[in-house]
Image (cartoon, rainbow, N blue to C red):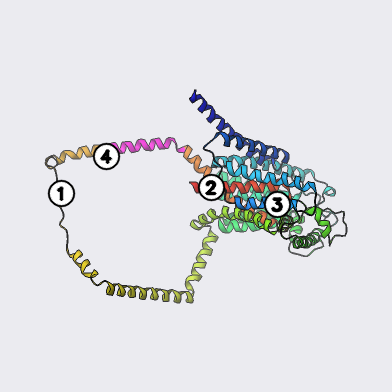
Amino acid sequence: MNRISVFARRQRIKNLETWTIRAIAAEAFCLAIFPELAAVAVLVGIVAWFLRLQIDTKFKMRSLPFDVPVTIFIVLGAVSVFMSPARDFELIYNYCEIVGLYALTYLLVGQNIRTPEQVRFLAKGLGAALIFVVLYGYFQYIFGVEISEMKWIDGEAFPEMRKRIFSTLENPNVLAGYLDVMICIALGLLAKFGTRKQKFILLAVIVALIVCLAMTYSRGAFLSLAIILVIYAFMYDWRILTFLALVMGVLFYTDENLVEKVIEIFTTTNDTAEGLKVGIWVSTISMISDHPFIGVGWGAYKFLYPHYNYYLADSKILIDNAHNLYLQTAAEVGIAGALSYFWYFFGTMFAAWRSSYEKVQESGSYFYNLFQAQFVKVFMESKFLQEFAQAKSMFMLRMADLTHKILDKVSPSNETKTETKKTVKKKPEPELVHHDELKFSSKKKPKDEKKSDDDNIDIQKFAENISVFEPDRQQKIADRQFAAGMKLGIGLAFLSMALNGMSDDLLFNVPSSILMWMLGALGAAINLFENED
């Protein structure tokens, strides 16, 4: 009876673990396609995880690297809502719904992803969603989107742009940020994981994503991707940069509108969107200066902005975000809340890069090794440093002589003791050999040889037994390489979000922001089980 109950208990634990991981993968799939179903998946996963905690005594909660800043951000966000001058019930509902999903996603992923196999399962959900989003984006480009229905483009300034895709994410800039994140993850996998065939598939996926990115006509996303590719080439493989630069060159050659949009980043034009952003930034800075400690309240930016609308005459225009990640966060939750948020944000990015950087130091790319060699050359040829090194060596020699002299004066008997110890030599003791060994020493050799043969046979059997488990071992190695590639990709993805955040707050979109929290928790989980090994 006890055996049956133990077996049933183990089976329940296994089922709850399976349901939890499936719920995480379902959330990853639904985020960019069906956000409402993603919220349902989170709740299912939380319930399954809670039930597992009740019956599995070995499964304990663990502390993640950035639990402290996450907790501070959540608490200060709640304080900002209750102290907000907007005094709207929608703020409380918005905070409980959105920040609640942030916290639950962070806990669900960070506490339950504990093996490389689970990392791969979550990545399958992200990959399946990516295929759907990209294919729908191509569909929009082929059949066209009415530009009059798009509020994010100046139709008078760019009447020739009849196609600007947004797929399932409702905004071309948000789609561009999402594609940047997925390109970064693919680049991380390309650096750490896969055979030649798998790397070729990853490269083809990256090209398809870049083509889809070009259809969004998002200038900031293109510039962010270019910076990331340069960093990637410097740290890992310059050939990838050359190939992808060729792909971008073909895109620019075939689409004049894309060239104009990118050139506008570096030139002054009459683009009303850029002038609007500058006015919003100035107004947001005034908002921060008036509410520096707790902000205007999480989600209250759109309610308070009309009081700071210094540069827009039309009060009917709804401004719901600051088009800048840093200003938006500081305005809503205050400077302290923003610091805790970016402690988590940039801490996750640097933690994901740390082990990758150490690996690059061991076997870096051509550019990295060339830079390192040139740096060492300049360092060694410096006359000042050479003279400093000589003076240091002379100083160390003199200090060594001084210490020897002091020791000789303090303990003069040390020399005699050491000399006597050196002169007295112990005679080697004779080996005691049994008389049977002297008589039958020749017969002992075959016995020893037979013993060595038996040892060889045992080693061969052991090697054969190991070869039986070789496929499992190779799969585990591949899973760990995949997890390492995901971690590097997460670091690059956070860099892309940080760069895109300078010109547009792409994380104001709920699915994109939840994806950020999921990837942050995933990076922390990978760091934990890598350190445990």
Q: Which quadrant of the view contains residue 262?
A: bottom right
The residue labelled by disc 1 is 431
**Magenta region: which residues?**
451-470
**x and y percent of residue 325 in the render?**
71, 56
Q: Secondary structure at mark 2?
A: helix
Can the viewer see residue 193 in this picture? no
The residue labelled by disc 3 is 77
Q: Secondary structure at mark 3?
A: helix
The residue labelled by disc 4 is 452
Q: Nearer the viewer, mark 2 or mark 3?
A: 3
Instruction: Specify which label sits upstream in the sequence, 4 or 2.
Output: 4
Q: Nearer the viewer, mark 4 or mark 2?
A: 2
Is 7 rendered above or below residue 135? above
In three-dimensional space, the C-alpha distance between marks 1 and 4, rounded to whole angstroms, equals 25 Å
Please give the name of the residue rendered at 24% of the width and 72% of the height, measured from the top-left corner. Answer: 412
Check disc 3 and give the amino acid type. Answer: Gly
Instruction: Specify which label sits upstream in the sequence, 1 or 4.
Output: 1
Check disc 4 and give the amino acid type. Answer: Ser
| Prevailing secondary structure class for the magenta stretch in the rendered image | helix
Crowding around mark 3 (Cα neighbors within 10 Å: few <14, some 14 to 19, many 20+) is many
Q: Nearer the viewer, residue 394 or 64?
A: 64
**x and y percent of residue 430 in the render?**
14, 51
Q: Nearer the viewer, residue 412 or 179?
A: 412
Instruction: Specify which label sits upstream in the sequence, 1 or 3.
Output: 3
The residue labelled by disc 2 is 528
In three-dimensional space, the C-alpha distance between marks 1 and 3, rounded to whole angstroms, equals 82 Å
| Magenta region includes residue 460 | yes
Instruction: Specify which label sits upstream in the sequence, 2 or 1.
Output: 1
Q: Nearer the viewer, residue 204 or 213?
A: 213
Q: Secondary structure at mark 4?
A: helix
